[in-house]
Amino acid sequence: MAGQELPYVLIDCIGGQRGVFEDHVELLEKHFHLITMKEYLENKKFLSEKITAIYIWYHKPVINEELLQSLPNLKIIASSGVGIDHLDLHLLSRYGVKVANTPFAVSTATADFAIALMLASSRRLVEGYQMAVSPNTEYFPANWLGDEVSGATLGIVGMGAIGYKVAQRAKAFEMKILYHNRNRRNKEEESAVGAVYCKKIDDLLQQSDFVLLSVTLTPQTHKLIGKRELELMKPTATLINISRGVVVDQDALVEALQNKVIKAAALDVTYPEPLPRDHPLLKLKNVIITPHIGSATKKTRSVMVENMTESIQAGLAGLPIPNEVLL
């Protein structure tokens, strides 16, 4: 509003590897007075009572009790993306701070990328590219084959916004769709994509040609897929992970891939990120690893900024917060 001071919003930094994108700053500065962590630390006495919101981009700035204690008027934290495993919701609740994320902004791009991983793995796209450009290639072998996605069974673990959009896309490939979720979708939603609910994850693992992990990281989903679960999967099956690296026991996955317990894996997430350069997953031909880019499109990033801006504005105005994360 004219003549009214813009709200002070704490960010980590601008630009660089993890900072707020420089081309997003202009939009944000129309609504907020941005304060970097460096500026805040250099002028804490003045800024501590001014800051009313925190804008988290790529998990930065890090939120801890020391920071919360120093910001007595903090009302809301807006965090980019879906995952909130970097935030202690119980701690924030004790300080009366609300939290918002951007689950719907990322769902389309991430669902597209899940399908891309499935296709790339099944048709051995990376291996094919390497063969095509290798200086040692003299001919293309006729028996170099992949697997078809069309008509195969896809098991989706985590049928939230992203998982459901994956199912919509998989339907176009005439895939049989199974899903496991904390809460069953209603009959209309299941019917729209032809999805069959598996109350037990074991049933899904045993039947699926492709197992897609699209869950939120919680204590219950930490190492959800381990040695036992991998051994339940078909030896011809592929594991696709677009959630968080620690949802899978990576040591068990390496062993399963090396011993042909499952056929392949396609991972947009690992732990840590990036993996150490000598990690065994990087040496396996039946693994595709991408650098956590499921939602990394220009359009999605712009929508995320808009969503976070709207959430902060609503939180500061005492209005219902879009995409509020509740305990």
Image: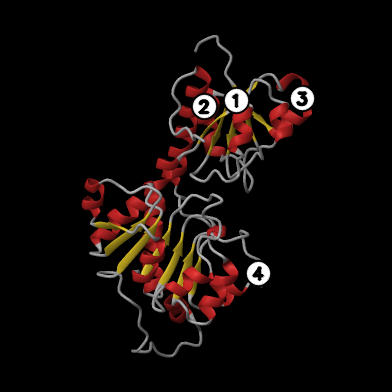
Crowd rating for badge 1 (residues with CA inside 10 Å; few <14, some 14–19, many 20+):
few
Q: Say the numbered circle drawn on residue 17.
A: none
Left or right, 284 with reference to 119 = right
**Which of the two labelled residues, at mark 1 and mark 4, occupies the earlier sequence position?**
1
State the CA–CA distance, disc 4 to disc 2: 39 Å
Q: SS for tag 3?
A: loop
Can you tell which quarter of the image residue 222 is in? bottom right
State the CA–CA distance, disc 1 to disc 2: 15 Å
Crowd rating for badge 4 (residues with CA inside 10 Å; few <14, some 14–19, many 20+):
few
Residue 12 position, x and y percent, is: 65, 37
**Which of the two labelled residues, at mark 4 and mark 3, occupies the earlier sequence position?**
3
Q: Say the numbered circle drawn on residue 312.
A: 2
Q: SS for tag 1?
A: loop
Can you tell which quarter of the image residue 14 is in? top right
Front-lying residue, 147 or 260: 260
**Which of the two labelled residues, at mark 4 and mark 2, occupies the earlier sequence position?**
4
**Which of the two labelled residues, at mark 3 and mark 1, occupies the earlier sequence position?**
3
State if disc 2 and disc 3 touch (CB < 8 Å): no
Front-lying residue, 318 or 96: 96
Q: Is residue 292 above or below residue 127?
A: above
State the CA–CA distance, disc 3 to disc 1: 24 Å
**Residue at (55, 60) in percent of width and height:** 223
**Which of the two labelled residues, at mark 3 and mark 2, occupies the earlier sequence position?**
3
